[in-house]
């Protein structure tokens, strides 16, 4: 358990570091490592699209199959050949990003709690993907196909399922017939269809799914694959001949690595590896996990059913139902099983405004561990303690850079569950309550520990998403910084520059009219 | 707009991706068996024999008319004993058991041997009814194996029992 913890957290640090290196040229939105699921889907669509073309030109007889595929690569290299290469290379890309996606989700401990469903439905995808990929290599019926078919059936025969060894189908040249290819193609279309269906199920529990990478990333990726297809077209080996062992083979290690591994070890070892590995993935989420945080709670009296929380919730945990007390009105309902305890809903609720006179601030939807009332109290007490000439409030995120380190007499910090919990009105409230500037920091783009939090925060504060920061708040007094756990230094630097800028421009930037709840309340 | 440095960085990383995919899609080469070696595949699926008893005339009379088979046979099949020698040396010995819950299915064996290319004396013996001693099927031959050749040892009663292919 502890070994696993160490391994996982080291993997997490390593993966995040590499992601951050990729951020430099790509930026968060175009960073492939931050959109691995979407990349896998993109490769899958390329595989499906090119596969449809290959299917239409395939001759499924024993004599025809090898030459009909060969024809594509030679005579029709400019179309069929390129599509064939794309089919193969995007399969390889798919396997690669699928495995990276798995590692990333594991490293980030994305397998338990509210993510249990996504994780459990992800595991069978690996089997389906390899089933489809290995079967594809058989269709060509060249020496590689012969090698893979023989090796796969020998592996299958190790299991006590078949009364006659399936490897007998590939014993001698007269062992196979045309029907074999018809069945094979049926399987090679059926399994990918099953895979697509299973992917759909995999994505069922989350909203605003990253179905495709950004346009730029898609263009770059297809460009790289096309270039590869031109420089190194995928070709067949010599036709299969079951009377001879295939000679030295160029094998696709992304898909067929299992065969050399079996030769190197033993079928028993491979099955142990596959079954134990699969079991481990399934059992991982069932091991003791950190205690789940309290989930979002709706306050019926303060919810008007506007459905903003429903729209912003990254895990489809909120539905809108008829209001129990107000006929004709709606109310938000939280499904505790789906809730990730991120607080993004509290940040989206129009009732979450601190400009209300109630002593106990109540809103439509709230996190028991950090209610908007607690947030307002923290903010008010921070404002009253601030001193110095340029007083700054920093709103941070528990998952991002450590804001506590920035705390100083002229800098007050408040760390949130997720930056998405921050209702934009709190920025205005801080400025009108005596702060000279507000810094909001959260994870890097695409790096939200939950999903979408950093994106919704940025959109709300730049007035592209409701609830918006009010127009009268001067942009110069607000700084948005993306900062991961490794970005403490750059965050500190950004704060330093921000303070200097405010200090030098103090006279030229608008100042909002002061507001104090306690005094104006009685005024 | 992208900074030139970012463009260069992206080009490098896309290039690295294409190179990585392109390389491992075909390399390193894999050599399943050495160049001068041939493969002998022993693959037999055969229904073992069984001991049947001839019914006497009285016994047959007692049976309903439609069930008067002259032989009474058990469901269970015999194990099959199999021996393979290469160049006079024992290469493989096994006793195959019938499949099926009632031991009434075929017995199977599948085994790969590597042999240096060249001429070998191959001898295969099989007994499919272990109540009898010895081997009721024997096939011996001198075979010349070319490098990478696959020689199959199979059994088919219609082809005269054990055969090499
Ligand atoms: C066929 C291969 C796969 C595809 C196409 C795929 C695709 C995706 C996509 C598009 C997302 C949504 C990402 C987002 O919008 O934030 C996702 C999420 C997820 N995937 Fe996969 N996936 C695959 C395999 C796997 C595997 C093998 C696992 C692990 C066992 C896995 C675990 C997860 C988890 C835990 C999430 C949830 C992430 C979150 O809640 O933040 N996936 N996947
Ligand atoms: S806390 Fe997060 S997951 Fe839960 S209901 Fe609110 S937005 Fe959805
Ligand atoms: S955002 Fe607030 S008011 Fe709107 S439905 Fe959700 S809880 Fe109710």
Image (cartoon, rainbow, N blue to C red):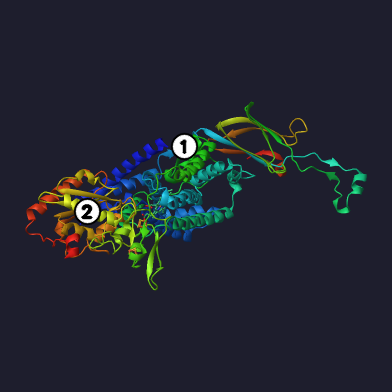
Query: In terms of image quadrants, where is residue A251?
Result: top left
Looking at the image, is mark 2 or mark 1 nearer the viewer? 2
Q: Is residue A520 left or right of residue A261?
A: left
Q: Which label number is shown at residue A200?
A: none
Label 1 lies in what chain? B
Does A343 appear above or below B71? Answer: below
Residue B8 in sight from this viewpoint:
yes
Which quadrant: the C terminus of chain B? top right
Q: Which of the two residues, B41 or A91, is positioned nearer the viewer here?
A: A91
Residue farthest top in this picture: B89
Image x and y of residue A465, in percent:
27, 63
Q: Which of the two residues, B150 or A445, is positioned nearer the viewer here?
A: A445
What is the C-alpha distance between the residues marked 2 and 1? 69 Å
According to the picture, the residue beneath numbered tag 1 turns out to be B31
Mark 1: few/some/many CA within 10 Å (<14, 14-19, 20+): some
> Does the closest atom of ligand 1 sit within 8 Å of the Cβ of label 1?
no
Residue A209 in sight from this viewpoint:
no
Query: In terms of image quadrants, where is residue A54?
Result: bottom left
Q: Which of the two residues, A275 or B34, is positioned nearer the viewer here?
A: A275
According to the picture, the residue beneath numbered tag 2 turns out to be A379
Mark 2: few/some/many CA within 10 Å (<14, 14-19, 20+): many
Image x and y of residue A468, in percent:
24, 63
Q: Is residue A409 left or right of residue A275?
A: left
SS for dot 2? helix
Label 2 lies in what chain? A
Image x and y of residue A514, in percent:
14, 61
Image x and y of residue A217, in percent:
30, 55
């Amino acid at each position: 358990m502890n070994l696993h913890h160490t391994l996982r957290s080291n993997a997490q640090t390593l993966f995040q570091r590499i992601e951050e290196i990729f951020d430099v040229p790509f930026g968060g939105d175009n960073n492939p490592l931050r959109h691995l699921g979407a990349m896998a889907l993109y490769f899958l669509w390329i595989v499906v699209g090119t596969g449809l073309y290959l299917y239409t030109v395939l001759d499924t007889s024993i004599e025809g199959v090898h030459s009909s595929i060969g024809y594509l690569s030679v005579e029709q290299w400019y179309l069929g050949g390129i599509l064939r290469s794309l089919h193969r290379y995007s399969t390889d890309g798919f396997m690669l990003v699928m495995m990276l996606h798995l590692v990333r989700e594991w490293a980030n401990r994305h397998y338990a709690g509210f993510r249990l469903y996504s994780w459990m439905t992800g595991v069978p995808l690996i089997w389906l993907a390899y089933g489809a990929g290995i079967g594809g290599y058989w269709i060509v019926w060249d020496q590689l196909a012969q090698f893979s078919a023989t090796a796969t059936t020998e592996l299958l025969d190790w299991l006590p399922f078949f009364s006659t060894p399936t490897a007998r189908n590939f014993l001698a040249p007269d062992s196979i017939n045309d029907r074999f290819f018809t069945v094979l193609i049926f399987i090679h279309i059926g399994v990918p269809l099953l895979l697509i269906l299973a992917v759909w199920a995999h994505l069922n529990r989350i909203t605003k799914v990253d179905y495709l990478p950004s346009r730029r990333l898609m263009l770059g990726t297809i460009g790289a694959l096309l270039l590869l297809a031109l420089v190194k077209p995928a070709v067949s080996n010599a036709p299969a001949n079951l009377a001879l062992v295939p000679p030295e083979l160029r094998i696709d290690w992304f898909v067929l690595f299992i065969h050399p591994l079996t030769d190197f070890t033993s079928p028993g070892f491979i099955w142990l590896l596959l079954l134990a590995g699969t079991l481990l993935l399934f059992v991982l989420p069932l091991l003791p996990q950190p205690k789940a945080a309290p989930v979002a709670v709706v306050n019926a009296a303060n919810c008007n059913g506007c459905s903003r929380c429903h729209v912003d919730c990254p895990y489809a945990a909120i539905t809108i139902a008829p209001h129990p007390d107000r006929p004709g009105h709606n109310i938000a309902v939280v499904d505790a099983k789906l809730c990730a305890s991120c607080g993004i809903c509290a940040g989206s609720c129009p009732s979450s405004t601190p400009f209300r006179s109630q002593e106990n601030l109540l809103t439509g939807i709230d996190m028991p561990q950090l209610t908007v009332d607690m947030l307002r109290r923290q903010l008010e007490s921070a404002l009253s303690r601030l001193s110095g000439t340029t007083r700054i409030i920093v709103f941070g995120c528990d998952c991002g850079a450590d804001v506590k380190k920035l705390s100083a007499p002229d800098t007050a910090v408040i760390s949130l569950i997720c930056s998405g919990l921050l209702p934009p009105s709190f920025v205005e409230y801080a400025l009108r309550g005596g702060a000279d500037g507000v810094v909001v920091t959260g994870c890097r783009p695409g790096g939200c520990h939950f999903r979408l939090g950093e994106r919704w925060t940025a959109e709300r504060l730049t007035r592209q998403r409701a609830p918006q920061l009010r127009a009268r708040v001067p942009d110069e007094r607000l700084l948005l910084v993306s900062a991961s756990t490794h970005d403490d230094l750059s965050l500190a630097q950004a704060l330093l520059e921000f303070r200097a800028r405010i200090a030098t421009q103090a006279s030229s930037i608008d100042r909002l009219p002061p507001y104090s709840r306690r005094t104006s309340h009685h005024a | 707009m992208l900074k030139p440095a970012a463009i260069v960085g992206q080009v490098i990383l896309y290039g690295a991706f294409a190179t990585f995919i392109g390389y491992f899609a075909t390399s390193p080469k894999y050599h399943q068996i050495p160049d001068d070696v041939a493969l002998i595949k022993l693959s037999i699926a055969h229904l073992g024999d069984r001991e049947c008893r001839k019914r006497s005339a009285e016994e047959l009379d007692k049976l309903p008319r439609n069930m008067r088979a002259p032989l009474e046979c058990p469901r269970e099949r015999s194990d099959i004993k199999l021996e393979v020698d290469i160049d006079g040396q024992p290469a493989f010995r096994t006793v195959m058991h019938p499949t099926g819950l009632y031991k009434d299915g075929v017995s199977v064996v599948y085994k790969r041997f590597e042999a240096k290319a060249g001429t070998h004396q191959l001898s295969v013996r099989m007994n499919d009814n272990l109540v009898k001693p010895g081997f009721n099927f024997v096939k011996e031959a001198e075979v010349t194996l070319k490098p990478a050749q696959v020689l199959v040892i199979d059994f088919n009663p219609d082809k005269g029992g054990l055969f090499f292919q």
